[in-house]
Image: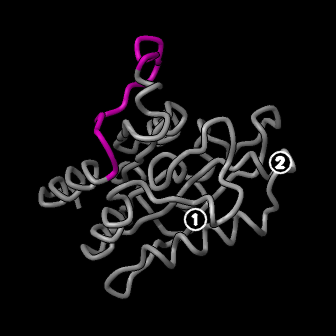
Amino acid sequence: MRTAVFLDRDGVINRNIDGDYVRNWEEFEFLPGSREAVQKLLRENVPVIVVCNQACIGKGLVSEATVQEINRRLVAQTSAAGRKIRAVYYCPHRAEDGCQCRKPKPGMLLEAAADWDLDLTRCYMVGDAISDIEAGSAVGCTTFLVKTGRGSRALQERQNWKTQPDFIVENLAQAVEIVLKQREEPIW
């Protein structure tokens, strides 16, 4: 069984749009250092999988084809050393739809584990919201909360969280450094 790094998209890789969604590629803006952080993982042959809630589809604000195109371009723009993001899993549902894939439920992580033969207890989940941390923790991933995106605001509610992240970091680049440092230890 293999390991991987799961990344939330909006707020971890690219800027969140406050009160709205990334509706097209023109609105997609990489956070400083995030593209390079993804590429660093890829150059080190660490599998990267994106898992993101995209309720904008269920709300009828953005078509599924548009989200797929944004994700396709994300994969193309982050490829390095002949490697690319393995997959992008997204939940198109609204919170009230009660699906099993929308974070904080771990459905996307479980699907990826089945598709890629992953040992989730050896995987990492990097996100900017407590829902990312809860999804990763539910399946045994080591979790990182980044302070980018919604992360800094989320930390203000930390005392109310039932699940705490394993690491709190400034950004994706810092999370990647920790992952790669742990990779040197015999967990891989």
Kindly identify the amino acid type of the residue bearing the numbered disc 1: Val
Which residue, as the protein is rendered here, is positioned at the far bottom? Answer: 82
In the rendered structure, does residue 62 fall within the stretch colored magenta? no
Figure quadrant of residue 180: bottom left
**Counting residues from the N terminus, which is met first, the one under dot 2 or under dot 1?**
2
Q: Residue at x 44, y 36 (%)?
A: 137
Q: Nearer the viewer, residue 37 or 94?
A: 37
Q: Magenta part of the protein: which range?
A: 156-172
Check disc 1 and report the residue beneath it. 88
| Image mark for residue 58 | 2
Question: For this view, does 47 lie left or right of residue 58?
Answer: left
Question: For this view, does 32 lie left or right of residue 53?
Answer: left
24 above or below 101? Answer: below
Q: Nearer the viewer, residue 19 or 51?
A: 19
**Could you say whether the residue bearing mark 1 is in a helix, strand or loop?**
strand
Q: Residue at x 71, y 56 (%)?
A: 23
Mark 1 surroundings within 10 Å by alpha-carbon count, few (fewer than 14), some (14 through 19), many (20 or more): many
| Image mark for residue 183 | none
Q: Residue at x 70, y 51 (%)?
A: 91
Kindly identify the amino acid type of the residue bearing the numbered disc 2: Gly
